[in-house]
Amino acid sequence: MTTANALASYAASEHNSRGRAIAEPAPKYRGEYQRDRDRIIHSTAFRRLLYKTQVFVNYEGDMYRTRLTHSLEVAQIARTIARALQLNEDLVEAISLAHDLGHTPFGHAGQHALNECMRDFGGFEHNLQTLRVVDKLEERYALFTGLNLCFETREGLLKHCSLANARRLGDLGRRFIERTQPGLEAQLANIADEIAYNNHDVDDGLRSGLIALDQLAEIPFFAEKLQFVKDQYGDLEETLLCREVVREMIDTLVTDLLNSSRSAITLHAPETIDDVRHADVPLIRFSDPLAASQLELKRFLREHLYAHPRVSLMTEQAHATIKLLFDTFTNDFSTMPENHAERARAAAVNDEAAAARIVADYIAGMTDRFALELGERFR
Ligand code: MG
């Protein structure tokens, strides 16, 4: 049995942490990464995840994953593996819970639309926006803007980054220029995200009726799990059958990730977190066959679920709504709440891009429902 355990020497810890941008007194009865997690949970952006979606727009029904339940699933998977590998559970939980904070309303459709609106002003990218939320946009502390999170938490949130942005981001961007790895907790949260969304999109996709069981059975990995569940339990009613198959897939992926990562860690024998950062490959990894299965699953979802006509219809509506909001706000700042309007007016005096960024921040922070309501009002 595993219990909360000693950390591996190469795990992130408060002793090897690169600290916070603004130094603070040590917490009295929590660890530093627990404090990060708690700040994330108390943030406005975190609460709004409840009304934001990835594939289905929030009004489509209460039965699908929201970004909040998705983030909880990511944290659950990542913590299980972190404990088994003696990595820092608190850090991995903080990264998992915060990893989607920068997402616009309407999932990927919203991000594409906002990126298009921002084309002449530096673009919009949800991953960078997540960092912006925790570094700048959350306003709840008298002594600093943002949440003033530890370096390792922020490192985990910045999953990818262009070279131009990396240069702008200083310390945090350096690994994209030097091509080094982030800590194992960051690597783990990133892969746990993939495991969570592939599997819950299968689950939500089946329940919505947009994809069918026999379609999915064309994927060898899924077919193998389907057969396993049938052999194990005989004739199951379809909903239960699907749930058992998804459960089996997650179990197989987690087990594989655990074993392959253990082997990679043994092979590279890191002693410190800097050894991890300088390893030539990420050490948290699937075996090759399972990595291929994951890709296959992703490809299937892209083709059959994300591009499904009913999803595309939502996508088009989402796109139109975001564009309408952006145009309305940029044409007349006073259509935004006064605090945003005032900042945008001040910025616009000598920097059009900075003003557009304030509009984008406002839109990105909206929930699906709020954006739709506002869209109706301006139509
Ligand atoms: Mg995610």
Image: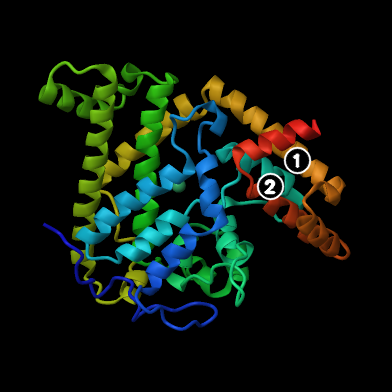
At label 1, the amino acid type is Leu
Residue 165 found in image quarter:
bottom right
Residue 363, which numbered label? Answer: 2
What residue is drawn where x is 40% and y is 66%?
182
- Decide if residue 32 is in sight here: yes
Please report whichever mark, 1 or 2, sits nearer to the chain's N-terminal start.
1
50 relative to 170, above or below? above
Which part of the image, by quadrant, shows the C terminus? top right
State yes or no: discs 1 and 2 in contact (Cβ < 8 Å).
yes
Which three-letter amino acid code belongs to the residue tagged 2?
Answer: Ile
- Rendered location of residue 77, percent (x, y): 30, 49
Under 8 Å from ligand 1: the CB of mark 1? no
Looking at the image, which residue is at 27% across and 40% down? 250
Label 2 secondary element? helix
Apparent side of residue 98 relative to residue 28 in the rendered image (left or right): right
User: Would residue 369 be found to the left or right of residue 278 on screen?
Assistant: right
Residue 300 quadrant: top left
The disc placed on residue 325 is 1
In the displayed structure, 58 sits above or below 234; it is below
* In the image, the residue with mark 2 has its CB under 8 Å from the nearest atom of ligand 1: no
SS for tag 1?
helix
Taking the image as drawn, is residue 101 in sight? no
> Which residue occupies the foreground of this view, 163 or 104?
104
Marker count (numbered)? 2
Q: Where is residue 320 drawn, in percent x and y?
A: 71, 32
Left or right, 328 with respect to 175, comes to right
Position of residue 118 relative to residue 269, above or below, is above
Query: In x, y percent, where is residue 65?
Result: 44, 36
Q: Nearer the viewer, residue 6 or 159?
A: 6
Q: CA distance from mark 1 to mark 2?
A: 8 Å
Label 1 crowd (10 A; few <14 / some 14-19 / many >=20): many
**Quadrant, the N terminus:** bottom left
